[in-house]
Amino acid sequence: MSLISIAIKSIRKRLLSSTLTSLSVALGVALMIAVLLANAMVSRTFDLQRIGYDLIVGPKGSELDLVLNTVYRVAPPIENLPWRYYEELKENKNIGVAVPIALGDATEEGQFPILGTTVEYFSVDYVEGKKFKVKGDFPRRQWDAVIGSQVARENNWDVGTEFRMVHAGQDDHVHDERFTIVGILAPTATPNDRTVFVNLEGFFAISGHEKPIQEAIDREMEFFGQTEEQVRAYHAADLAELAAHGDHDHSHDHGDHDHHHHAHATPDLQKEVTAVLIRMKEDPRNQTIALSRAIEFSAKLREGFKAQAVNPIRPMQRLMNNLVGNIRSILLGLTAFIIVVSGIGIFVSIYNSMADRKKEIAIMRALGADRMAVFSIILLEAILLCLLGGLLGIVLGHGLVMIASPVVGSATGLVIDPFLFDPLELILIPVMILLAICVGFMTAYRTDVADNLAS
């Protein structure tokens, strides 16, 4: 009979004791895994080193609020930019892609953030080297929508589902217009998973999303530092069309239940965007700095100009260093402490389990079993218990994260990857085996036959 067969028979003979020992190991490992992954989540959630865009251009205000709004979609928009500014910005010869986005509304079901944009949004990697994958198509037509994987899962939506949106900040005001889902994004482990993307023209066409004409004129006067005559001259074609058709009020004929079509497209004068996502053509570092300085210079040069260009990494780095970084340091210290305590607990549990068998070990030695054979059997038992407990602990630890991730996501609005893996996990099983070897040596190899038989 092989030594491993003897070890397995011995474990079966002491099934209750062996089970409790393995369970103790499993709980210790699960606790280590949970703390390690919690620390990794904090780091990964606020890590923008590989974001697909070089700059975010938005209204003047808090840089951090702009990033939290446009990237994480957990803060309300600061203000909006005139569509005319986006049109001017994308003419910059150094800009490769300029993607307009409009935020503020949420879905009627689940309160997931709505992001109005163009199909160009999906042409840029969501992180460097990773492209969007979709089941279906991207939102090419006015009333098309694409949803993130988390939205599809929690709302039980699929391609062909129609939905309505709640007006920004007004839970009791639901828009009549319905968008149709034409695609579902593959999981990205980013805020895109909990976002609903709608065609930007459809977003503009929703009743109440158009800027009243005089307010739009006043806004451009302030933004560009122009007179009313200059603004009206720039938008002469829009104003002429509005005058010909009357004020563009997005009136609908609800009686025929045709909630997808309006008589007229929204004039550029009445359009506005939350921000513009920028990816430079080449030499991103220098071109990004140059564009940021140009926008900052324009803001100083033109009275009333209210735009800023933000490198999304910088405000998040400040947040990490000033707030999250301190929390992360505490979490790292707590992780180290818990790992040490759990390791000691696992060691004591295995040691007590093996130490109770010193008399049995002494009898085996007295009956003629050599020291190495006894040591090998006990060592194999300890290793098997550690391996079983360690593997169960890894499963339990990841199970806890999978259960907690949607809860944390719903409470914070952040996307937590339930399949997150920390490289430090790879050393846990070798450490368990090392502990087993130490325990085996202390209990079997060093057992004094005479003393234990006498006792």
Image: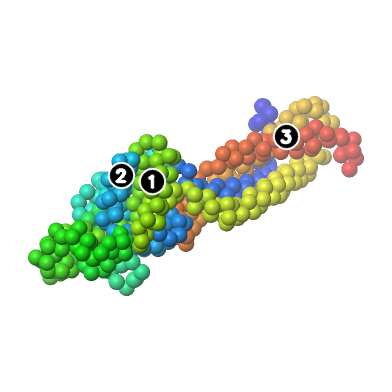
Picture disc at residue 291: 1
Q: Please tell me whether mark 2 sits on a helix, a strand or a loop.
A: loop
Q: Which residue in the structure is indicated by mark 3?
A: 437
For badge 3, the amino acid type reads Ile
Question: Between marks 1 and 2, how big is the CA–CA gap?
Answer: 9 Å
* Left or right: residue 175 compared with residue 17: left
Q: Specify the amino acid type for callout 1.
A: Leu
Q: Does 390 sit left or right of 52 as displayed?
A: right
Q: CA distance from mark 3 to mark 2?
A: 66 Å
Q: Could you say which disc has been placed on residue 421 in the image?
A: none
Pick whichever of labels 1 and 2 is earlier in the sequence.
2
Q: Which amino acid does the dot numbered 2 rest on? A: Asn
Q: Mark 1 or mark 3, which has the lower sequence index?
A: 1
Answer with mark 3 or mark 2, whichever residue precedes in sequence.
2
Residue at the spot x=30%, y=59% of the render?
Answer: 224
Marks 1 and 2: CB-CB under 8 Å? yes
**10 Å crowding of disc 3: few (<14), some (14-19), many (20+):** some
Q: Nearer the viewer, mark 1 or mark 3?
A: 1
Q: Residues under labels 1 and 3: Cα distance?
A: 61 Å
Given residues 99 and 423, the one toward you in this image is 99
Decide: is 390 above or below 411.
Answer: above
Numbered disc 3: secondary structure = helix
Please state which of residues 113 and 317 is positioned toward the viewer in this rendering.
Answer: 317
Residue 23, horizontal then vertical, whole percent: 64, 48
Q: Looking at the image, is 267 positioned above or below residue 388?
A: below
Judging by the rendered image, the residue that carries numbered circle 2 is 92
* Residue 112 falls in image quadrant: bottom left
Helix, strand or loop at label 1? It is helix
